[in-house]
Image: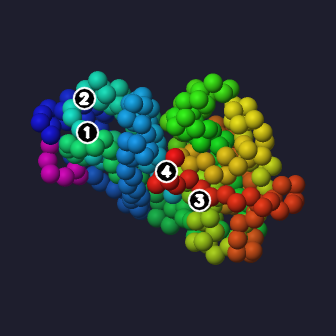
């Protein structure tokens, strides 16, 4: 890309205070970081592509938030504390009108979560963003998908379904006249990674995952890795009033809550013996926590409403689905 180094210097270098564990962040072939003794480094990489994960016409500040938040959420699901991020940007051409607010959004969220940019790349091509985040978690304390046991409670953070409603507005502007359409569109882009919850659940939760593809799909990953089944009580799903008014009925809102992707909330399991410890650990964290079901030995995921099985045929969010 012509002017690549000027672009990097102007928008990405020296935009943040340097963490004490960053030895070298820019100016050489690799970044150098120092991990504390007794910690493991959690690493996650995601790519967001214009037209698949966001519209090229979307607010670039919101796009930056979504891109980084989705990666931070992966760290939260492992109980890791955010530390460093690398970022590769592909653009059809240099567009500083787009890039300036993008970087404002990117560094605002990075600073909020103590995440320092330590390297990356820029190149010419279709608009896409690839981020690799790294965080720190004490050895033996990482939250995994594989530890759920029969009898564990199933919990989620926040509210579910709003992101899908926001995507409906983005993909079909006729939905813009529905109640709370603009608020839900904003919610699709501006999620809140639950790192504090993840850190608090270390040593308490038996399994965890972030909700990127919908509760149906993501809880299913826990069930598969743990070799268990589950019952989800759909009347317990946490729903927002804007979602209820946007879709017009509780059953429709409940189905949104089960299938909505890119929520970036956490779904986790906790043994009943650790429930009191969980509430104690979470009491000072400003985040709604809701129990939505129980792990069982059915070897499948059952949906119930007031104790009765539902025959809903639902699937999670699919990035490659044609809308």
Percent x, y of residue 149: 69, 71
Residue with the mark numbered 1 = 91
Q: Are marks 1 and 2 in contact (CB under 8 Å)?
A: yes
Q: For the point 58% across and 38% down, which residue is it? A: 168
Query: Which one is earlier in the sequence, the residue at label 4 or at label 2?
Result: 2
Q: CA distance from mark 3 to mark 4?
A: 21 Å
Q: Which numbered circle lies on residue 322?
A: 4
- Label 4: few (<14), some or many (≥20) within 10 Å? few
Front disc: 3 or 1: 1
**Local SS, label 4:** loop
Q: Are marks 4 and 2 in contact (CB under 8 Å)?
A: no
Q: Which numbered circle lies on residue 59?
A: none
Q: CA distance from mark 1 to mark 2?
A: 8 Å
**Local SS, label 3:** helix
Q: Quadrant of residue 94?
A: top left
The boundaries of the magenta stretch are 27-32
Residue with the mark numbered 2 = 95
Q: Is residue 151 above or below residue 106?
A: below
| Nearer to the camera, 180 or 110 | 180
Q: CA distance from mark 2 to mark 3?
A: 36 Å
């Amino acid at each position: 890309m012509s002017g690549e180094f000027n672009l990097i210097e102007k928008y990405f270098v020296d935009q943040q205070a340097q963490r004490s564990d960053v030895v070298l962040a820019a100016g050489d072939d690799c970044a150098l970081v120092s991990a504390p003794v007794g910690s493991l480094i959690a690493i996650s990489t995601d790519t967001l592509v214009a037209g698949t994960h966001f519209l090229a016409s979307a607010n670039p500040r919101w796009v930056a938030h979504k891109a980084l938040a989705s990666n931070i959420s992966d760290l939260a699901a492992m109980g890791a504390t955010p530390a460093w991020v690398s970022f590769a940007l592909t653009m059809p051409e240099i567009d500083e009108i787009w890039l300036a607010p993008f970087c404002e959004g990117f560094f605002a969220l990075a600073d909020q979560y103590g995440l320092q940019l330590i390297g990356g790349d820029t190149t010419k091509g279709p608009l896409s963003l690839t981020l690799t985040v790294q965080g720190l978690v004490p050895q033996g304390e990482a939250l995994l998908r594989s530890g759920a046991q029969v009898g564990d409670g199933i919990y989620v953070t926040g509210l579910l379904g709003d992101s899908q409603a926001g995507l409906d507005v983005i993909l079909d502007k006729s939905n813009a006249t529905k109640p709370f359409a603009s608020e839900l569109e904003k919610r699709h882009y501006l999620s809140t990674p639950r790192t504090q919850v993840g850190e608090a659940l270390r040593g308490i939760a038996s399994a965890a995952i972030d909700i990127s593809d919908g509760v149906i799909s993501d809880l299913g990953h826990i069930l598969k890795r743990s070799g268990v089944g589950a019952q989800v009580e759909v009347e317990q799903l946490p729903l927002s009033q804007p979602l209820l008014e946007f879709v017009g009925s509780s059953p429709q809102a409940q189905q949104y809550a089960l299938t909505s992707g890119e929520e970036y909330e956490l779904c986790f399991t906790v043994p009943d013996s650790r429930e009191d410890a969980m509430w104690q650990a979470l009491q000072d964290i400003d985040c709604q926590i809701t129990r939505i079901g129980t792990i069982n030995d059915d070897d499948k995921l059952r949906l119930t409403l007031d104790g009765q099985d539902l025959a809903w045929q639902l699937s999670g969010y699919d990035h490659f689905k044609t809308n």
